Image (cartoon, rainbow, N blue to C red):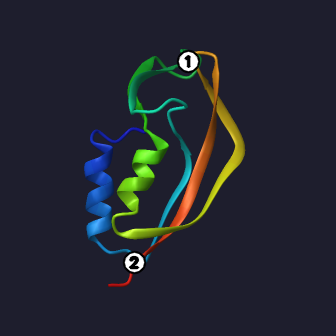
Amino acid sequence: PYVEDPYLFLNTLMQLKIPVLIVDDTYFNPASGDRLTIQKVSPIYYDASYPAWFLDHEKVKATVREHYTIETEYRNEQCLYLYGEKVDYRGFVSRLKVT
């Protein structure tokens, strides 16, 4: 969520032809499309804010499927709320396609 250009980063990783690519504990936009937000840190910890992406889950998977086969997907018990809407943390495990 904190990478400046997440799809460029993902494509760069895939060009390395890593045998197994895991996307773990990631939150995705509950609606279709990518969404750039601002995460504000509680002043109890320190005063800061960061840009944070809520990426489109299907778009990320479609990007990965260009070079990988998604073998399993999951959600875990963690969640956060984006404007009152519950957003689950999700992930998937993919394996490099053999060519």
Q: Where is residue 26 in the image (x, y as percent from the top left)?
A: 54, 45
Q: State the residue at coordinates (48%, 44%).
A: 57
Q: State the residue at coordinates (41%, 31%).
A: 52
Q: State the residue at coordinates (40%, 63%).
A: 65
Depth check: 9 or 61 in front? 61
| Picture mark count | 2
What crowding class fits label 2: few (fewer than 14 Cα within 10 Å), some (14-19), or many (20 or more)? some
Give the residue at mark 2.
97
- Does 89 sit left or right of 5 as displayed? right
Which of the image's four quarters has the N terminus?
A: top left
Could you tell me if the residues under marks 1 and 2 are in contact, i.e. CB atoms within 8 Å?
Answer: no
Q: Where is residue 97 in the image (x, y as percent from the top left)?
A: 39, 78
Give the residue at mark 1.
42
> Which corner quadrant of the image does residue 14 belong to?
bottom left
- In the rendered view, tell whether residue 56 sits above or below residue 62: above
> Which corner quadrant of the image does residue 3 belong to?
top left
